[in-house]
């Protein structure tokens, strides 16, 4: 038996997996840009490797934890409102089952079934699992598969960390003359990849997304390098 609709944001559907993948790419992108800006800025002021490593690592941890906390809060809020909607639905099903059957029939009819078929389908769905049927058709959620805030938080944390590791390693591993060129080139290449992937996953035109994403990173690194160099020259 197939689902009556293709839901984009919930359940194990293709749309939902693409959304997760896209969120992971964007999280990695954030990690790359913010950490690159940070370490390039510090490199403008000092060539001391342990200072660069400390700043980069602190930026990685601060950024990944902030992303994880933000994601945890936002998914928890979404989950709370989904649970509240399910509780309302459960009560309505108990108190006015006939109105609910009529409502489900109407929703299925609105999706293109004839009145008679919609009624039969609604009766069958209600007999099997009324709450799940209403959750899916009416609310667009799967009651057994609500988004887990901890999963979302971990996913953000890992995505940001994966992105942040690139500029961090690029600034501390090469010999000092090579640090900036290696970091800038690898960051811009990585941003081209993340820009391209997120555009493809969102079915948008990749070329423009790549240009925007690479430009954004280039601006971030230029500004922070300029600020770092000014502070370094001023001896702050
Ligand atoms: Zn309902």
Image (cartoon, rainbow, N blue to C red):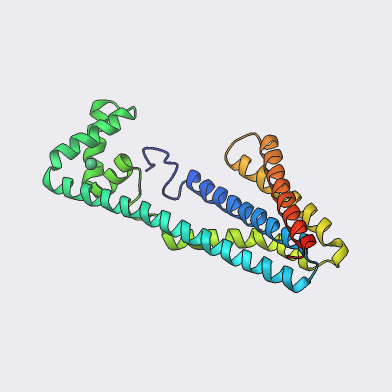
Q: Residue furthest bottom?
A: 50
Q: Residue 234's x, y, as percent?
A: 77, 61
Q: Residue 63's x, y, as percent?
A: 58, 61
Q: Is residue 38 left or right of residue 232?
A: left
Q: Is residue 14 left or right of residue 80?
A: right
Q: Is residue 204 left or right of residue 83?
A: right
Quadrant hosting residue 104: top left
Quadrant hosting residue 144: bottom left
Q: Is residue 48 above or below residue 149?
A: below
Q: Residue 137's x, y, as percent?
A: 31, 40
Q: Nearer the viewer, residue 114 or 105?
A: 105
Look at the image and tell me in which quarter the C terminus lies: bottom right
Residue drawn at x 14%, y 49% is 94
Q: Residue 151's x, y, as percent?
A: 47, 61
Q: Is residue 155 visible?
A: no
Q: Nearer the viewer, residue 166 or 205?
A: 166
Residue drawn at x 30%, y 46% is 135
Q: Residue furthest left?
A: 95
Assign ligand 1 to one image quadrant: top left
């Amino acid at each position: 038996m197939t689902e009556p609709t293709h839901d984009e944001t919930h359940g194990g559907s293709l749309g939902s997996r693409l959304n997760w993948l896209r969120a992971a790419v964007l999280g990695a992108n954030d990690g790359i840009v913010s950490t690159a800006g940070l370490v390039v800025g510090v490199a403008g002021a000092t060539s001391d490797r342990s200072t660069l490593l400390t700043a980069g690592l602190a930026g990685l941890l601060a950024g990944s934890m902030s992303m994880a906390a933000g994601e945890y809060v936002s998914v928890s809020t979404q989950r709370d409102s989904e649970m509240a909607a399910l509780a309302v639905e459960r009560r309505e099903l108990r108190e006015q089952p006939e109105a609910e059957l009529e409502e489900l029939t109407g929703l299925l009819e609105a999706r293109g079934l004839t009145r008679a078929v919609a009624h039969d389908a609604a009766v069958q769905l209600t007999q099997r699992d009324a709450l799940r049927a209403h959750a899916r058709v009416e609310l667009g959620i799967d009651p057994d598969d609500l988004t887990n805030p901890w999963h979302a938080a971990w996913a953000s944390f890992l995505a940001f960390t994966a992105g942040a590791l690139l500029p961090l390693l690029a600034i501390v591993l090469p010999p000092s003359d090579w640090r900036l060129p290696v970091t800038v080139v690898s960051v811009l290449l990585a941003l081209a990849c993340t820009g391209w992937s997120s555009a493809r996953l969102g079915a948008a035109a990749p070329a423009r997304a790549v240009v925007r994403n690479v430009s954004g990173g280039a601006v971030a690194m230029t500004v922070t390098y300029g600020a770092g160099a000014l502070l370094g020259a001023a001896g702050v």
